[in-house]
Amino acid sequence: MECALMYLFHGAKICMDTLEKYLRGLCHYLLGPVVLSLAFSSPVYALKIEDTEAKSLTTENGVRHLRMPGFDDSGMMAWELFANEVNFQRDGVYEAFDLVLDTMTGFNESNAKSKQGLFNPNLGQAWGESFLEVQGKGFWAKGKKWTWANKIESGDQLMAFKESGEVLFEDNLLIENNKAKKDPIPKKVETSLFNTHTSANYIEILELSPNQNRFLLEGQVLVKSESLEIKCTWMEILFEKDANTSRASSSMGKIGKIIARGKVAMKQPGRRSYADELVIETSTESAVLKGNARVEDDEYGLAKGNEIVLEKGKRRAKVIGGKDVRPSLQLPEIPDFGFPK
């Protein structure tokens, strides 16, 4: 109990309803419903815990070696924050140094680290200017000017970077053949273990549901893997987890869909593709170029249309015209076979 209650701050003015929420979740997690009812039958008991247990953590400059858990509405632990030093700022906001944030909901369990940041435990939010590194199941991310929120209106465990953002994925994208699975990622991240590198001005990671994650990239988006490069201004990558996969699995699932928009340029060996929008689907194993679509193939020539469909593992393209755009296919020149002119 002493270790688990280390998150209570000496001298901090915590309102009773917030204190009750944390202690209720903590007692439910550690001791079960019997002690839960006992702890909240007497407000004096709860206050006594705060007065006695928090004093050993307080120094002249703040709190040392903080460990603070956060709970969801059901009383299960949703996140846990560690910090070597914590100082109170204002209005329930604290400054943390050498912080480590573990998220535990759904299938996107992750571990995030930063040298410095601010956090509000009552709201389940944190933010900072320095680099934050995030290691999750099947991905690794980093960036500056970061934000974390335990819950927002559209999902859980938001991680966002507004500067120098990068995300690395274990798998290749859908229109490539993925390599065999490697050993689990070691604690010290080695970038050579990842097959796909992405970067953008703004990157957002969000758990939309227990079975779906979204990676959002905006501004100067670049995606590179073994035999593929995509440039655009906006991209959404959706990962889906099989319902039969256990929670303890080291994988975050498979890519379900990729949507890229804004001056999309895709390069593959012997082929360059351009469009206003690109949609890659798992179910069809195809890439669809939409709006001002153009494919330049070293073997088959130039194809233009309102929509062009590229199939995985094949060099052929299906060209679809629009109302004002007729499909066209320009084949390469016939080679000189050495016949007399």
Image (cartoon, helix red, strand yellow):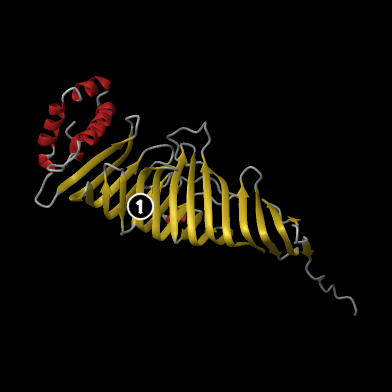
Which residue lies most toward the right here?
Answer: 340
Say which quarter of the image contains residue 25.
top left
User: From the viewer's perspective, is 152 left or right of 316?
Assistant: left
Say which quarter of the image contains residue 322.
bottom right
- Position of the C terminus by quadrant: bottom right
Q: Please say whether residue 156 is visible from this viewpoint.
A: yes
Is 117 in front, or is 269? 117
For mark 1, give the secondary structure: strand
- Position of the N terminus by quadrant: top left
Residue 258 to residue 232: above or below: above
Q: Where is residue 216 in the image (x, y as percent from the top left)?
A: 48, 52
Q: Which residue is drawn at 24% across and 24% down?
A: 36
Q: Position of residue 127 (x, y in %)?
A: 31, 53
Q: Which residue is drawn at 61% across and 52% down?
A: 279
Label 1 crowd (10 A; few <14 / some 14-19 / many >=20): many
Q: Where is residue 4 in the image (x, y as percent from the top left)?
A: 21, 34
The amino acid beneath tag 1 is Thr
Q: Where is residue 308 in the image (x, y as percent from the top left)?
A: 70, 56
Q: Please say whether residue 175 is visible from this viewpoint.
A: no
Q: Residue at x 35, y 55 (%)?
A: 146
Say which quarter of the image contains residue 150.
top left
Q: Which residue is drawn at 12% across and 43% down?
A: 11
Which residue lies most toward the top here?
Answer: 34
Count the marks: how many? Answer: 1
User: From the viewer's perspective, is 247 left or right of 9?
Assistant: right
Residue 39 to residue 278: above or below: above
Which residue is label 1 attached to? 147
